Image (tube, rainbow, N blue to C red):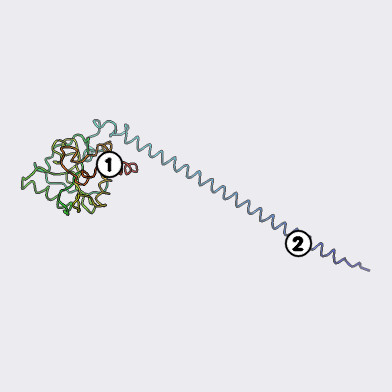
Amino acid sequence: MEQKRNPYLRDYEEQLRQRREAARRRARRRKILRRRRRAAALLLGLCMVSLACFFVIRDSVKASAAREAGSGSAFPLDDPASWDRSSLVQGLPPQIYNRHPQWTEDFLTPNEYSRPGDALEQVTSIFVHYTANPGTSAAQNRSYFEQQKDTHERSVSAHFIIGYEGEILQCVPLDEIAYAVMTRNQDSVSIECCYLEDDGSFTQETYDSLISLLAWLTDAYDLDTEDILRHYDCGGKKCPLYYTDHPDAWEALKEDVAQYREGL
């Protein structure tokens, strides 16, 4: 006669089987989780290695470019006298010139009153001017310089004119003198700025373009912000008007140039 199994024993065995199955499922989940963690760690490691390689390659390219721009190239930056003059652009090595802010070349017609064509052999200062004509545009002031070849009224010009909307016109190449500061034409670059307000203050657009142009010029010619001068600083003419009346604003302008230059 077959002996009947104890129902309590059957329940215990079933509970035991379920616990073992649950334990196996937990073990499988932990195993999958460990695999995922190892894969994530491996992927993170590969990313870090790739990033490190990127910076190494980037720094290598920069160093190579610096060497090429330095004594190993036709343009050793610490010895301008040895530059390959035939390859210069407006008196500057191409790798320096090509970093200039956006401007429009609209050179004056060569003439003895506004673009004499005399060589600008060195640049030791950058002069900032204002047009003394409120509300006139960069194009209008450029036309005034151009008209001097016909009217012979004055000897006057500038390398650049910045309009009150921020546009920059280049009127005279950087390897030629402009008639802007009588006693300093032979060693300086001049920038005329348009304006709208009677106090001579510049629009924000004019100011922003001026800062970017000054930053590039001082960097290109290896000058300090103290080499940025007002026309007023050479001869006492109240030009640019706002910055002669507000010397604190002039100092702030030079600080803005220094900060902008750090990003070049």
Q: Nearer the viewer, residue 240 or 105?
A: 240
Query: Height in image: 166 above or below 64?
Result: below
Residue closest to the eye, 92 or 74: 92
| Residue found 63% across the figure and 53% down from its top | 33
For the residues carrying marks 1 and 2, which lies nearer the camera in this image? 1
> Residue drawn 30% across and 34% down?
73
Q: Is residue 253 left or right of residue 146?
A: right
**Which sits in the foreground, 29 or 125?**
125
Tell me the SS state at disc 2.
helix
Whether residue 146 is situated above or below residue 6 in the rendered picture: above
- Residue 14 in picture, x, y percent from top left: 79, 63
Is the C-beta separation of discs 1 and 2 under 8 Å? no
Mark 1 or 2 closer to N-term?
2
Q: Position of residue 106 (x, y in %)?
A: 17, 49
Residue 225 falls in image quadrant: top left
How crowded pointer 1 is (Cα within 10 Å; few <14, some 14-19, many 20+) is rated as: some
Which residue position holds label 2?
Answer: 18
Numbered mark located on residue 251 in the image = 1
Q: In which quadrant will I find the C terminus?
A: top left
Left or right: residue 95 versus residue 17 is: left
In this rendering, is residue 214 above or below 122?
below
Check disc 2 and give the amino acid type. Answer: Gln
Question: Position of 260 compared to 118: left or right?
Answer: right
Q: Indicate left or right for 90 with 5 as reference.
A: left
Tell me if residue 104 can be seen: no
* One can see residue 203 in this view: yes
Q: Residue at x 24, y 42 (%)?
A: 247
